[in-house]
Image (cartoon, helix red, strand yellow):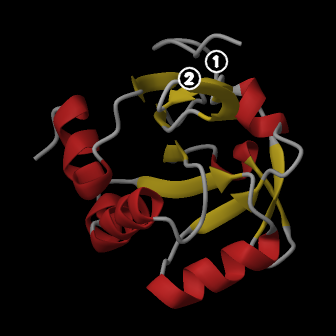
Amino acid sequence: MAFLKKGDKAPEFTGINQNGDEVRLSDFRGKRVILYFYPKDNTPGCTAESCSLRDGYDDLRNKGFEVIGVSPDSAASHTNFRAKYDLPFTLLADSDKTILKAYGAWGMKKNYGREYEGVLRTTYVISETGSIEEVITKVNTKDAVRQVMDVLGID
């Protein structure tokens, strides 16, 4: 599936968060959402990206954003990951890859010449009305917050 583009309507989704509760994109209507897709809890790049978003979370919230992370890991894995790194935002378990596929964040990857299916690290910024404001496909895991702010032109 192709990536969504700026201006597209963000696909509605329902996912299970780290507490086992259902979370819908529509729960965040009226707020801007940073929806980030990452491959795996507790791996170096994913941890750096999540911690960058954690460190900038208060600033993001003050600017009207909510943050939601999505990976194919289980809710139990997310619970441990959140606790270990004190992540204040929602993480959704997408083990059946429904959300990943709806957003074009699941597809063919290449590593050391080997091709395989996996998570395509991607960040979407979704407007208060549910449309895609920005798409970041070359995510700077170490400074994800600054990258989002720069793309949006926010200080």
Residue 121 drawn above or below residue 6: below
Q: Residues within 10 Å of mark 1 (few under 14, many from 20)?
A: some
Q: Is residue 91 at all visible to an observer of this figure?
A: yes
Q: Residues within 10 Å of mark 2 (few under 14, many from 20)?
A: some
Seen from this angle, which residue lies furthest left?
155
Q: Which mark is residue 9?
A: 1
Query: Dots 1 and 2: beta carbons under 8 Å?
Result: yes
Which residue does the image show at 56% across and 33% down from the upper left? 120
- Decide which of tag 1 and tag 2 comes sooner along the chain: 1
The secondary element bearing badge 2 is classed as loop
Which residue does the image show at 16% across and 32% down from the upper left? 153
Q: Which mark is residue 74?
A: none
Residue linked to disc 2 = 131
Q: Where is residue 140 in the image (x, y as percent from the top left)?
A: 28, 44
Tell me: 133 left or right of 143: right
Query: Which amino acid lies under the numbered mark 2 shown in the image of this protein?
Result: Ser
Residue 151 drawn above or below residue 27: above
Return the residue nearer the eye: 57 or 117: 117
Which residue does the image show at 28% across and 41% down from the upper left? 148
Query: Which amino acid lies under the numbered mark 1 shown in the image of this protein?
Result: Lys
Return the residue nearer the eye: 17 or 132: 17
Q: Where is residue 64 in the image (x, y as percent from the top left)?
A: 38, 54
Tell me: 52 left or right of 132: left
Q: Position of residue 55 (x, y in %)?
A: 29, 72
